[in-house]
Image: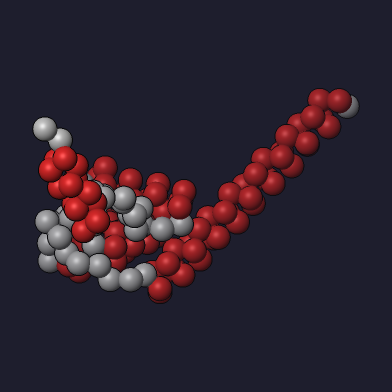
Amino acid sequence: MDSDNTTESLFLSLDNATKNDEHLFEESKQSFIYAVSFICLTLYVGGMAIATEKAHCVGWYFESKSITTVQRKFRNMFKKKKPSRNNILAWHEKFLEARSVLDKERSGRRRRSYETVQDIREAFARSP
């Protein structure tokens, strides 16, 4: 009898896990639809994919789970060179983690203020 209870509880656990996975997938799909609806357009710079192109790729990958299908749809829609397998998977992972395909804001180089330049000039003028 104990083995029957163990087997039954195992099947119940598997069934609950499957339902949970389906729920997470549907939640991710809804988040993707929301993101595509409100995503801002960015400039096409240096051959890199813009945010809307990345978002389309993530959506197509959610639908088909096929890199080849995503690449074909991309080429047909945007009339550009297809994205690499690694890029598509990276965009997909980024979306799952951050709910966005946009790049994080970079700090970049600090700006030089007029006051800083003046301070440096004065320091050089005082030093022998």
Q: Is residue 67 visible?
A: no
46 versus 33 height, above or below: above
Left or right of 96 in this view: 53: left
**Residue 16 versus residue 119: which sits nearer the camera?**
119
Which quadrant: the N terminus?
top right
Instruction: Tell me the quarter of the image containing the C terminus.
Output: top left
**What residue occupies the far right of the structure in this picture?**
1
Q: Quadrant of residue 43?
A: bottom left
Residue found 83% across the figure and 32% down from its top: 5
* Protein image colouring: secondary structure
The one of 120 and 54 positioned closer to us in this rendering:
120
Q: Residue at x 18, y 47 (%)?
A: 122
| Pick the front one: 94 or 18 | 94
> Looking at the picture, how far across and down is residue 86, in whole percent?
26, 42
Question: Looking at the image, which residue sits at the far bottom?
Answer: 37
Q: How many marks?
A: 0
Which residue is at a point 40% across and 47% down the rendered structure image? 93
Residue 7 picture location, percent across and down: 76, 31
Apparent side of residue 58 relative to residue 110 in the rendered image (left or right): right
Tell me what residue is drawn at x 12 percent, y 56 percent: 47
Can residue 115 be seen by looking at this rendering?
yes
Q: Position of residue 2 (x, y in %)?
A: 86, 25
| Figure check: 84 above or below 64 | above
Give residue 124's position: percent from left, percent from top. Answer: 14, 40
Looking at the image, which is closer to me, 21 or 41?
Answer: 41
